[in-house]
Image (tube, coloured by chain):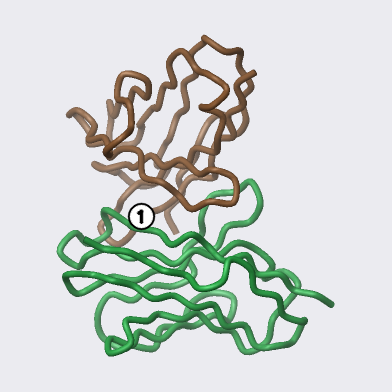
Chain colours: A brown, B green
Amino acid sequence: GAVVSQHPSRVICKSGTSVKIECRSLDFQATTMFWYRQFPKKSLMLMATSNEGSKATYEQGVEKDKFLINHASLTLSTLTVTSAHPEDSSFYICSARSRYEQYFGPGTRLTVT
Amino acid sequence: AQSVTQLGSHVSVSEGALVLLRCNYSSSVPPYLFWYVQYPNQGLQLLLKYTTGATLVKGINGFEAEFKKSETSFHLTKPSAHMSDAAEYFCAVSGSNSGYSTLTFGKGTMLLVSP
């Protein structure tokens, strides 16, 4: 099946700094990628839909100025958490849509100290 | 709009026993239904999906699920649990009009397998 990678897998940053997470579709082109957030023992919450070459569509309640999404190519989307705070600590998962399904990345564990 | 309800946040079975994880959905359009498995600190892996056609769907690792429209259910089963099946399982739905976009997930069921 198709492969989606995320980098980094884990990141620890200090409060107030920014962190960039990359999501790549390795063997297919994805015009649409999705970013999810998963809290401990909770389900996945869709944060935003990322469309190549256009602005991301954010879900209600997600701060677009805090969670910057860029989808510059058909194989790469990035999520930048700006001015991170401890409450932003979470597991972030991306997915890439092919014609037949969504393929999920392995996730990025963000810890803000 | 779609929603998913997974009954039971935790299900415990013995190795070799039947696995049954329940999922009920709500959808205003014909649904696409999915089961995903998540191992600790990993992303989601697709177990199986229903789009159209046969209502009994077979997936990987011996899992299967049956789409029952009259019951709005898509329960996941496996005849004999293995220790390696211990993981979190998520049921998800999307509208057939949106295909593989806009997945709505249930809250997940943790499957515990004891020797």
- Residue drawn at x 15%, y 64% is B97
Q: Is A16 displayed left or right of A78 in the figure?
A: right
Residue B5 or residue B18, whichever sits in front: B5
Viewer-closest of A87 and A71 = A87
Question: Compared to B78, does B29 lie above or below?
Answer: above
For residue B37, what is the image quadrant? bottom right
Circle 1 — which element?
A: strand
Residue at the (28%, 86%) spot, across then down = B69
Count of numbered marks: 1
At which x and y percent is residue B33? 34, 71
The residue tagged 1 is A102
- Is residue B31 found left or right of A102 in the rendered image? left
Task: Identify the image quadrant of the C terminus of chain A.
Answer: top right
Q: Is residue B67 above or below residue B88?
A: below
Residue B53 image offset from top left, x and y in percent: 26, 85
Q: Chain of mark 1?
A: A
